[in-house]
Image (tube, coloured by chain):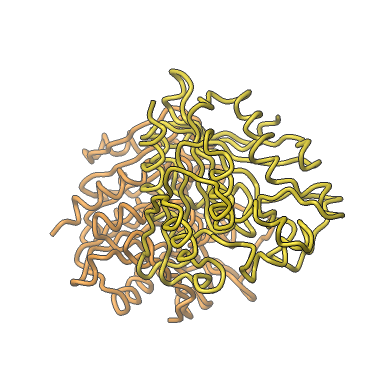
Chain colours: A yellow, B orange
Amino acid sequence: MDTISQALSHGGVQGVYRHDAASTRCPMTFAVFVPPQARSGPVPVLWYLSGLTCTHANVMDKGEYRRVAAERGVILVAPDTSPRGPGVPDEPDNWQFGCGAGFYVDATQAPYDRNYRMWSYVVDELPALVAANFPADMARQGVFGHSMGGHGALTVALRNPGRFRSCSAFAPIVQPSTAGWSRPAFEKYLGADPAGWRRYDATALIEDGHRFPEFLVDQGSADGFLQDGLRPWLLEEACRKAGIPLALTMREGYDHSYYFISTFMEAHIAWAAERLAA
Amino acid sequence: MDTISQALSHGGVQGVYRHDAASTRCPMTFAVFVPPQARSGPVPVLWYLSGLTCTHANVMDKGEYRRVAAERGVILVAPDTSPRGPGVPDEPDNWQFGCGAGFYVDATQAPYDRNYRMWSYVVDELPALVAANFPADMARQGVFGHSMGGHGALTVALRNPGRFRSCSAFAPIVQPSTAGWSRPAFEKYLGADPAGWRRYDATALIEDGHRFPEFLVDQGSADGFLQDGLRPWLLEEACRKAGIPLALTMREGYDHSYYFISTFMEAHIAWAAERLAA
């Protein structure tokens, strides 16, 4: 693991690191903020999964999480959203597939199955690296994310309820297997049979019996992707049928950007921190 | 004035605007955050002047000011740092001169005197535009900035003590007429005679009798520009001799970046807001 940069911020250390990832077969860059409390011992870990087109850097620059993470004493890890680099198959003109659009799945279809293994990377490989290199209490983990990363957070939590104590999302893609901006990617990564997509679809996972104690979701009412891409009412319906408490709030006038995310970042970190307290 | 973008954030509106500036003879882009309190009437205005290489966007993306500005009820305006565009003379490989490095002076030397009139732009033209187009109480203005913009804030306040009720700076260039990264720019913008530079130099202005009620300055101890470029002890000495209260704090381990600025943004906005209260 190489250290790309480190800087003191809000009393903690914001770092950027790179490593040769086995799961995605390429160098992967990620951001870790370590709060000042970690000088006295391991602290909880909060995973932030980013949306389409993002790298580790977008939330690091615009997410406004450091103040709250430093106050609450949580490590915040921000992975990249896909494999990248020479040899990684991509559709450079398509922002909804390939680099920047890994959708947190393990691809099964050539040529994508060689590198697009973001599920394994985010669920297995990067947590092991973080556990080995940072003062992280891996018994206390939470996960949240935005848009495609909200989809990632919901699915990761639903399939690993014993590992995560909290899960929340900003404007998540709640049913990627049927949304126009994700269904083509699912087909290319996972093949033509929709049955294989269900384990990467939050509403399908709930329908298929997966459970998580509770979710927090914020959604901007002025989000241009609300009606076709995000559709939080589908998650609301699935949670209602399954008896999963969902704290969904429509935020009047907010869009899909980091102006929205940063506004509600404090509430989401506070939600997680309460559930990550010892 | 054209609206480039507007988004709701922290209850207020973050906008980006462009206009054809008479002073700099080119289109200028600037950012304005209007807090929710402005719906009930005019609110104070805080000017943030950015450092070398920045546009209006750096502090907008990384400054983490919106939460506090929304809480405190102040408009925050972030101008660009220079004229830009076709026909604006520049040294593209020199980050300390030309585009991104206007140093908040009115150039007197050809060919720079045609466009590089950032003093007039920031002190006269943009305030008039803001007064005409935003719910701004121009009787209550404060100014702050970072690095080159800290120099800008100090000099603008010292020469306009009746207009500004507060002035603070993050890691300001306190004596640009003698610092290695600014002296060559002063010579090119203002000519070879150092006598002409004094009205754009905070310590020289204080020596020459200009006064301001008090300053707040934060400076990172791990700032790579501290010893040669910034030298806050020169401001400390000038303020001591002049009897100007200076609240200067060295921040252990902090560098020159927005990780530092964002950490102390809340304290600077709070300092300003107290002085801008009706």
User: Does residue B112 appear left or right of residue B219 in this picture?
Assistant: right
Residue A264, how many percent across, how many down?
A: 39, 53
Residue at left offset 39%, top offset 36%: A275
Give the camera-side residue of B130 and B258: B258
Residue A175, how many percent across, how many down?
A: 57, 62
Quarter of the image containing the N terminus of chain B? bottom left
Q: Residue furthest top?
A: A40
Residue at left offset 19%, top offset 50%: B274
Q: Is residue A123 above or below residue B164?
A: above
User: Does residue A191 appear left or right of residue B4 in this picture?
Assistant: right
Q: How many marks?
A: 0
User: Does residue A165 appear left or right of residue A185 in this picture?
Assistant: left
Residue B21, how many percent across, how many down?
A: 46, 78
Q: Residue furthest left?
A: B278
Quarter of the image containing the C terminus of chain B? bottom left
User: Does residue B187 appear left or right of residue B75 in this picture?
Assistant: right
Give the camera-side residue of B66 and A256: A256
Asked where in the image residue B74 lies, by quadrant, the reply is bottom left
Q: Is residue A257 above or below residue A244?
A: below
Residue at left offset 35%, top offset 52%: B144
User: In this view of the protein, can residue A96 be seen by the observer?
Assistant: yes
Give the camera-side residue of B203 and B213: B213
Residue A190, how many percent across, how many down?
A: 76, 56
Give the camera-side residue of A40 and B77: A40
Q: Is residue B231 above or below residue B271?
A: above
User: In this view of the protein, can residue B106 be seen by the observer?
Assistant: no
Asked where in the image residue A262 lies, by quadrant, the reply is bottom left
Residue at left offset 82%, top offset 51%: A88
